[in-house]
Image (tube, rainbow, N blue to C red):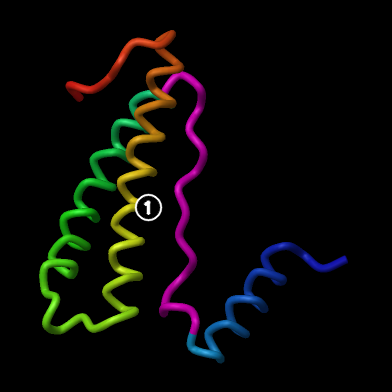
Amino acid sequence: MQDQSETQEDTCQAQSDRGYVREGPPTYTPAPDHGDIKETCFDCRKQIEIVKMTVQTLRDDRERVPGEIGANITLAYRHLEDARMRLGKAVQALDGGASCYPR
């Protein structure tokens, strides 16, 4: 059986050869412990809001974004909204149903 890092390197190299992967090592965020999950959810919500603003600028530039491209950008924006809302719902569940709307 191959070492997991070798398998990942092989996969990354194969994807890179096809042009699917950016240069540099793969990045990821380690899973938080349960004590920090609420704050991690709030941090993720903030980061999603920043990405949403960037995607919104693409949506606003309708002249340069034709047809299906614009439709996919709109779907991406909606998915970001949904992800942010669901993280809020996770915090709400952690708080026993109390809304976290102000944050």
Q: Quadrant of residue 10?
A: bottom right
Q: Position of residue 74 (x, y in %)?
A: 29, 63
Q: Nearer the viewer, residue 42 or 33?
A: 42
Q: Quadrant of residue 44?
A: top left
Q: Residue at x 27, y 19 (%)?
A: 100
Residue 22: in magenta span: yes
Q: Quadrant of the C terminus?
A: top left
Q: Residue at x 65, y 76 (%)?
A: 11
Q: Residue at x 44, y 26 (%)?
A: 90
Q: Is residue 75 left or right of residue 50?
A: right
Tell me the amino acid under the disc marked 1.
His
- For the magenta stretch, what is the residue range? 20-36
Within 10 Å of the Cα at label 1, are there few (<14), some (14-19), or many (20+) other Cα atoms?
few
Q: Nearer the viewer, residue 71 or 43?
A: 71
Question: What number of labels is visible?
Answer: 1
Q: Is residue 8 above or below residue 67?
A: above
Q: Position of residue 94 (x, y in %)?
A: 44, 16
Q: Could you say whether the residue bearing mark 1 is in a helix, strand or loop?
A: helix
Q: Nearer the viewer, residue 86 or 15?
A: 86
Q: Which residue is mark 1?
A: 79
Q: Quadrant of the N terminus?
A: bottom right
Q: Main secondary structure of the magenta part?
A: loop
Residue 65: in magenta span: no
